[in-house]
Structure formats: C-alpha cells, structure tokens
Amino acid sequence: MNLTIRHITRYRFEEPVNFGLQQLRKTPKSRHSQNVLRWDTSVAGGQQSLSYTDHHQNTVDLIEIDRGAQELVITCEGEVHLDDNHGVVGRHLGPAPLWLYRRVTPQTKAGQGVRALVRGVSGDTELDRAHALMAAVAEAVAYEVGTSESDWTAEEALSAGRGVCQDHSHVFIACAREMGLPARYVSGYLMLDHTTEQDAMHAWAEAHLPGLGWVGFDCSNCISPDQRYVRVATGMDYHDAAPVRGTRQGGALEALDVEIEVAQQ
Amino acid sequence: MNDQVYFDEMLGTEGTVRRPYQPFNTWFEGEDPKHLRAKQREAEDLFRLTGITFNVYGRAEAEERLIPFDIIPRIISGREWQKLSRGIEQRVRAINAFLYDIYHGQEIVKAGRLPEQMITRNDAFLPEMIGTRPPGGVYTHIVGIDLVRTGPEEFYVLEDNARTPSGVSYMLENRETMLQMFPELFSRNRVQPVSTYPGDLYNSLAACAPEGLGRKPTVGLLTPGIFNSAYFEHSFLADEMGVELVEGHDLRVEDGRLCMRTTLGYKPIDVLYRRVDDDFLDPLTFNPDSTLGVPGIMDVYRAGNLTIANAPGTGIADDKAIYSYMPEIVEFYTGERPLLENVPTWRCSDKESLAYVLDNLKELVVKEVHGSGGYGMLIGPTATKKELAEFRKKLEARPGNYIAQPTLSLSTVPIFTKSGLAPRHVDLRPFVLVSPKGINITPGGLTRVALKKGSLVVNSSQGGGTKDTWVLED
C-alpha cells in the first residue's frame, strides 16, 4: 500500500525572532517493511542548515530560523510504500545496542503504578504478555485528548488514569522495561479510515521479543500496527524521538497551526 | 605506618644521592639556605602576582586558588622517561581504540573481556555518541595520566584523566618560575623543555579539524567563565596558543557551523577545546537548563562540521571501575602486554572482593567510582574509627559505587623546609596530546606533592603543592 503524507506546521511569533533553532525528526524511515518513495522538507522563514542520522537511525534536520522572521512554515511532503507485517518490525539493526532500550529514562521510570500494572500481566509467551500489557495499559489510561500535559511521566499518566497516545506509549515502555523487555517509543503517522485530515501525529511503542525482534503495540487503538502506520522517528521516550525540539531568543509564540493529511494512493 | 621505608627519588633507599640528582645536589650544597629561603618567598610572590594578573575580575578568589610551590625540582632521568613515555603512549592508544569500540561495535563486550554492565550502567556513556566518528578518529585529544612510583623501576598508573585534565598551566608556570629564579641550574643540567606545550597543543588540535576545510582551521577555547576554578588556566592556554577564549554566549550556530561573535560579525570555529562538561554543552540535546553551552552544537558536531576536544562521552574511559579493566583493555586493543602497571584494584560490586575489602578496610584506600579530586575517599591507615565505621556502612549500602586499592608506598622527593630538605610523597601527571599525526607527550608533567609530613594525598584541594619536574637529556 502507498500512502501520501503532507504535514504543514505554521508558527506565528508575536514579535520578530532574534535567533532560533529547530531540531526536526520528521523524515520517515526507509527500513524494514517501509520504503520512502519520495520525501521533501521545505522551510519558509528559515533554512535547513544541516542533516545527519542519529543513533536511532532517525534523520535529523537542523532548521535555523531567519533573523527577524515573524512566521515559520515547515512543510513535509512525500509518499511511503508499506507492506503489512502484522506489527512485526523485525530484527534489531544498529548502531545502538539492544541493551540501550532497557535503560530507564525520566519519563519511563517505573514506580508503584507501573509495578502494579506489570503484576497483573500474564501469558504463556513474551508475545502473549506484551499483548496483555497493551490491553492493560488501554484499560488503565483512558484516551482523552487535551487532558494530559506533554511532559507527564508514565507514573503521572497512570495516576491520572487518562492521557493521549504519548502517555500510553510511555506507560507501555515503562512496563515492558520493568518486565525485562527492550522497548522504544515510535512517533509516526496513522492513516484514518473516515478522514484524510488530521491535526496531530500519532505515537506508539515497540517491544523487542524473542524470535520476532521489534513488535509494535498501539495501546490507543489496542492493535499492533499494520500497513496504515508510518514509522517516522524512534527513541527511548517522547523527548528522544520528538518531531521538533527547539530554542528561540525573542519571538514569543502567538499561534501554532498544524495540518496533516494522510491518504491512500 | 611510620616504620615503612619509602623510595626517595633523590636519596634512593640507601641514602646515597641518585645519579639524576647529583649535579643538582652539588649546587644545592654550595648554596646558602638563607638565600634559598628568600628565593622560596620570591617564588611565592611571583606566583601571587601572575595569579592576580590572570584573575583581574576575581581577585579574592585568585588568592584562594594559589597552590603552594616548592623550589626543589623533581628530577627524572632520560632513560626513566623513555620507558614511561612508551607505556603512556600505549595506554593512550588503547583508550582511544576503546572509546571508538564502545561507541561502535562494542567488540570488547562481545569478546567477553568487559562485562556489559560496565557500559550499560555507566552514567558517562553518552548514547548520542553511538555511531558518531569524531573528526580524525580522535576521542581524547588531551589526556593526563596520573602516575605514582614505588621504587627505582616501579611505576603505577593511578588514574587516567580522559575528560578534561587540568593542571598543565602549573607545569608551564613552574618551569617559567624556576628559569627566572635559578637560571644557573639550567646551565648545569640539560633539562628537556616544556615550553613547546602551547604550540604543540595548538598544532595537535588543528590537525584534528574536520576534513576538507580548504583553509587554516580556527581553534577556540570554551570556558564556563570566570567563576570556574580553572578559569585562569583557560585564559592562560588561550593566550599562549593565540586563540580566542569564548563563553557559551559568544557562540551560536550559523549556516550549520559553530560561529563566534567578532567585531566583524560571526566567524566559524572548526575546533573547540572545551572546558565545559558534556551535560552542559548543548541545552538542545543535553541539560536544557544549561547556559554554559551552545544550543545546536551537538548537531553541528554530529553532522561532521566541528571538532570538539575532548570528544563528548570520553568520561567512560576514566571511570574508576573501568580503570580496573585497563590491563585487559590495553591487551585487547594493542595485542601487547601493558608496559605500565595498574594498581591492583578490588571492585566492591563483586561479592568476594567486597568481603575482602571489609575485612581489610584499615589497610586499604577506598574510592568512589565516579569521584575525583580526592573527595569522598577513605585512606584506611590514617582513618579514625568513626571514619572507618562510616565507610563500612557506605560500602554495605552501595558496594558498586566503590573500588579499593592497597595503600601504595608512594615515593618521596625532598621539599625545602625551614630545617632543610625533607621527604614528601609525590605523584606525576604527564600531559599527552593526540592527533592523527601522532601522540605527543611533554617531557615531565605536573608533580603534585603532599606538603604535610607523612600525608599521601597530593590533591591541591587537600593541601597539596606542586614542583617543577625535570626530564634530563641523558
């Protein structure tokens, strides 16, 4: 299946920007059962000054905002070919060693809530247990847009009992690591059945299972990703895989406008 | 421990003046002690003056920071030095190969020569460096290897300083002072010069610039600022090398390069000798609250447009738990037996070792795995009962946080006291420069001396002083 994606992010600033940088992780990966046919990032109000591949094999672009800019528009556009792999991404490819994904980060630190959730998970195989975990996370954290904070930790989302895909992913990752499984965060796109227009990217988690390698788990939809899912960036947690990390001097943000279009060709 | 016999580098163990010290001794015996005492005071004044010149903005602090200087040089023969420098070079090569491996294939772990948890549980391991090859393939551009001596031929490596070794300015100042105070000594002894260090440092850094620049590389020195305890060294070295001394706010990323603010606008820097710790280097990638670094500098680095010296993440090589594996590390990467000995080290994370350490606490030195500067350590033989009991508790609570070593019989070198020469314990930190062109070791290094009689702690923060260190042309 081929998906076309168009993602426009518009920043409007209250006064001209003096100096600003954005670190982007917005280019889908050409790895495993996903192949990027074409992809283009264009910037208005800034310039793309360098690009490299990070230790999670994410493409990173650095954007320098033009001095005096009052608006920055980043447009990512392209086409991705996907094969259905029933959620199995496959064997671990470097350069980061697999053990790295067992490391705990501030947002995925296990506390009482995570440990209690893990205690309730059972199954005959690691795969069964991972599926049981996905269901448990979905039950423990209700999907509610606009009720969580973007810097919430897994424990905070668990004790609130609500959150978005980011929170689901953090809770799943924290639990999986607590269960001894390497786990990672995935940011990406999801084609929806009823509409091509969206206002946010999606996120899910992957756990590394014996015999299968990396397998995806989307707690928000309670399924393993199929060919409607486009993997963009991976990391230890949201912070590590975030589509945008930025810094600015001057130019307080006035408005942020996101348009995403994901359509089947 | 007072009945123990220590090797004295001037008098040996027999009390006859050893060969490298003979011309010095002849001179010393002909000098009037009163005259020398005046010279000692003069030397101290000279240091205070230089210190203040270097700390125009922080005079009060500068005086605090003065490290006592002793006028009696520590003298090493050319033959001794040759042997030492071969061992240092081998070790530094191994450290660089180790760092490349740790951030790439981790072959040493796969080969079973280093337990995986030494890396996985190590806070100094920087995931951001995985798969990144620093320009020129160099990780530790500047290394300080701390050595101690216990006999005529016995040298041990006490510590590898692979992050940001400091103290080289004292090495240079000490020699400068001796040349001014006692020029006649240098005509009687053929002492290998150290004054080439700033030029060598510059050349070595420039040789590590990103490839394909097509112009002479620009070098800069990044300091955390005047409140840093080593600021005087930062400004001294920048001055001596003829490069810009910069702080985070002087720098920014422009057109994909690191640039410094000049009167003519922003100008690219190709090699940054940074004296700012990894965590503070880039608020966009590391600690977001840091104001000492430059946002985006890691992106420029990872894109290959900048050399950072030393490379981020090198701290993993000078961790004290890794230290205990250095013999294996040297063998693994060089295929040779280590030329320099490691101090035998018990890793308290190991159950049997911990039991041994607890049983023999009074005889041992216990150090924190990540500690430095002589803080947080226990010296068994001189510790009080209370200190021993406290450390026993710490060891039992967090054994993996500690290593233990035997109390070494550190060699002594005479210092000049009111009642003449008196032996005091010393160590030695030679400074090593690494570039694709080769490894350069300045003859000598910084000798630190425990000024208190019987003390084995040479750290300046713990009452240590320094001496000029001579390597003779044999």
Image (tube, rainbow, N blue to C red):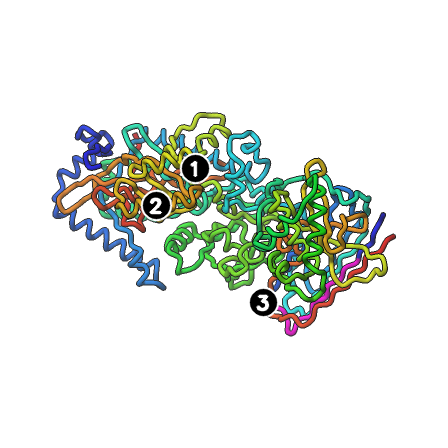
Is A187 in front, or is A250? A187
Kindly identify which residue carries mark 3: A249
Indicate the chain on which mark 3 is placed.
A
Indicate the chain on which mark 2 is placed.
B
Horizontal arrangement in the rendering, residue B79 relative to residue A148 (left or right):
left
Kindly identify which residue carries mark 1: B323
Mark 2 and mark 1: Cα distance apart in space: 21 Å
Mark 3 and mark 2: Cα distance apart in space: 48 Å
Is A222 in front, or is B305? A222
Horizontal arrangement in the rendering, residue B348 relative to residue B380 (left or right):
right
Tag 2: residue type? Phe
Is B210 in front, or is B125? B125
Q: Residue at x 49, y 42 (%)?
A: B316
**Percent coordinates x, y for residue A109 in the rendering:** 57, 52
Tag 3: residue type? Gln
Task: For residue A138, say whether it is visible.
Answer: yes
Mark 1 and mark 3: Cα distance apart in space: 43 Å
**Percent coordinates x, y for residue A115 in the rendering:** 59, 51
For the residue carrying disc 2, how many other residues have a C-alpha within 10 Å: few (<14), some (14-19), or many (20+)?
many
Q: Residue at x 44, y 40 (%)?
A: B433
**Percent coordinates x, y for residue B165 in the rendering:** 41, 46
Q: Residue at x 40, y 55 (%)?
A: B235
Numbered disc 3: secondary structure: strand
The circle drawn on residue B391 is 2
Tag 1: residue type? Tyr
- As drawn, B110 above or below A19: above
The circle drawn on residue B77 is none
Q: Which residues are magenta?
A: A6-18
- As drawn, A215 above or below B229: above
Q: Which dot, 1 or 3, sits closer to the camera?
A: 1
Indicate the chain on which mark 1 is placed.
B
